[in-house]
Image (tube, grey):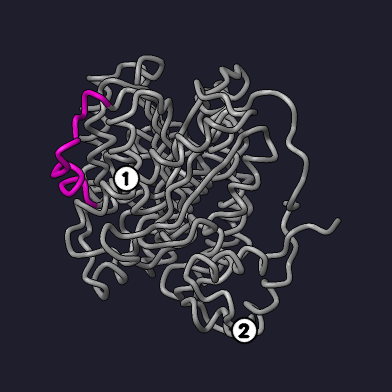
Amino acid sequence: MSPLQVLDYLQILKEEEEWEYLPNEQILNWFYYANTPANQAHLIEESNAYSNLEMAKGKYPVIVYAPSFQASSVENFALCEYLASQGFIVIASPGRGTDTRWFGNNIEKEIETQARDVEFLIKEAVKLPNSDHSKIAVMGFSFGGLSNVIAQMRNDNIKAIVSLDGTERYQYALLQKSPFFDLNKLDVPYLHMAQKDIPVKVLQEDNIDPALNSNFELYDSLTKNKAYQLKFQNLTHSYFSTLGVLFEKRDARQDKSDSEIMNSYKWLSIYTLNFLKAYLINDAAALAFIESHPDELGIKAGLLTYKSKGQESTVFTFQDFNDLAAAQHYEKLLDLYEKSLRKHPLLILPEGNLNTLGLQLVFNPNTSNQGINVLNLATQLYPNSANLFDSLGEAHLYIGNHKKAIADFKKSLDLNPQNQNAIDRLKTLTQ
């Protein structure tokens, strides 16, 4: 028995669109993706799924997947495969409009229609002999996030929500227009994973509201449940779906490398799995994972940011401070730190975190001055750190301020006379 290929999933897409006789060599042309040799090569790649396998014995939790705007049921097949391999029943349907195959202009109505599709899938899933209808979660990408929130507000049997850069973040006002919207009913664990900070250039050229980088109105409004917010700094919106990762054209203005995108999609999948195991099957190890800061899990710095709220999360973390600092473009950081410290006396901003954040911002030409602000705060909090002054010297050197760079490297050398980098830099700058 051979595993399914990517092409087998796109055959399902053809059937959904009633183009089952479309020649396979035309699939990419017809369904929105560039018909390049690289994309053609993806079509014959093998997945980890097999068709017509015998059902496993026992009872398993159910995940209902809601796709993005008018999209296919298979758009996130790799994530769905992964969850199925870990003991979940995963079911999905394509996004369809109320009156036709296409969504109409009344988007509020289309949200309700997709929510009803989710409810239909739940009814079908609980008919399966191996489904545990006491353990049901919904998961959705983009527009599917809106529909899942409404579905949960209408159905007490939905016990958790996974949002893959769900549109409830971007169009919270639209969500509120639904006659079924009732924030008091959103009382189940909620995981929202969001795209990276959109660069200033893209915001300006694409006429995007800069507030989207910091606004999480639904998450911020939640008071009845445990909630998590992750921001993946290597993923733009399209890459929260398998088809996007495989076939979407990369945006040279902001997209990361293929390996960085794939690595982040891997962690997106791991977080999804642990969240669902924690809250559907009460797995203690999974709960410990989802409650841990990425630093504690050995996740590379800068890959994602993490926040949580609810009864178990009362500590004001470095990431909480960073989110506030980013919202004010890393200006007046000492004032923000002192204000935060008054409210949260146990606040600690680790030296290493500040150093990493400062350099990441510095080496982005659009945020270099913001990075210098972070490193200046770091040297104020850790005035005896030779490493921080060395980093500040590199920052000033990067922007061409040689006078300040020399002063910083001299300070670093005063604190650590063995700092070879400072010795070398000073030799070069003073020649």
Q: Earlier in the sequence, mark 2 or mark 1?
A: 2
Percent coordinates x, y for residue 425 in the rendering: 55, 62
Residue 173 part of the magenta-drawn span: yes
Stretch of the chain drawn in magenta: 171-185
> What residue is shown with label 2?
23
| Frontmost residue, 54 versus 69 | 54
Q: Please give left or right for residue 109 compared with residue 19 in the image.
A: left
Residue positioned 52% across, 30% down in the render: 126
Position above or below: 38 against 260? below
Residue positioned 49% across, 81% down in the render: 30
Q: Please give left or right for residue 117 compared with residue 14 in the image.
A: left
Assess disc 2: are there few (<14), some (14-19) or many (≥20) residues with their C-alpha within 10 Å of its C-alpha: few
Percent coordinates x, y for residue 136 in the rendering: 48, 29
Q: Please give left or right for residue 211 compared with residue 354 in the image.
A: left
Residue 303 part of the magenta-drawn span: no
Q: Is residue 376 visible?
A: no
Tell me, for residue 147, which label it has, or none: 1
Amino acid, disc 1: Ser
Assess disc 1: are there few (<14), some (14-19) or many (≥20) residues with their C-alpha within 10 Å of its C-alpha: many
| Frontmost residue, 182 versus 414 | 182
Look at the numbered disc 1 and give the secondary structure of its residue. helix
Residue positioned 46% across, 76% down in the render: 252
Percent coordinates x, y for residue 231 in the rendering: 42, 46
Amino acid, disc 2: Pro
Residue positioned 60% across, 36% down in the render: 89
Position above or below: 347 against 271? above
Q: Please give left or right for residue 282 compared with residue 81 in the image.
A: left
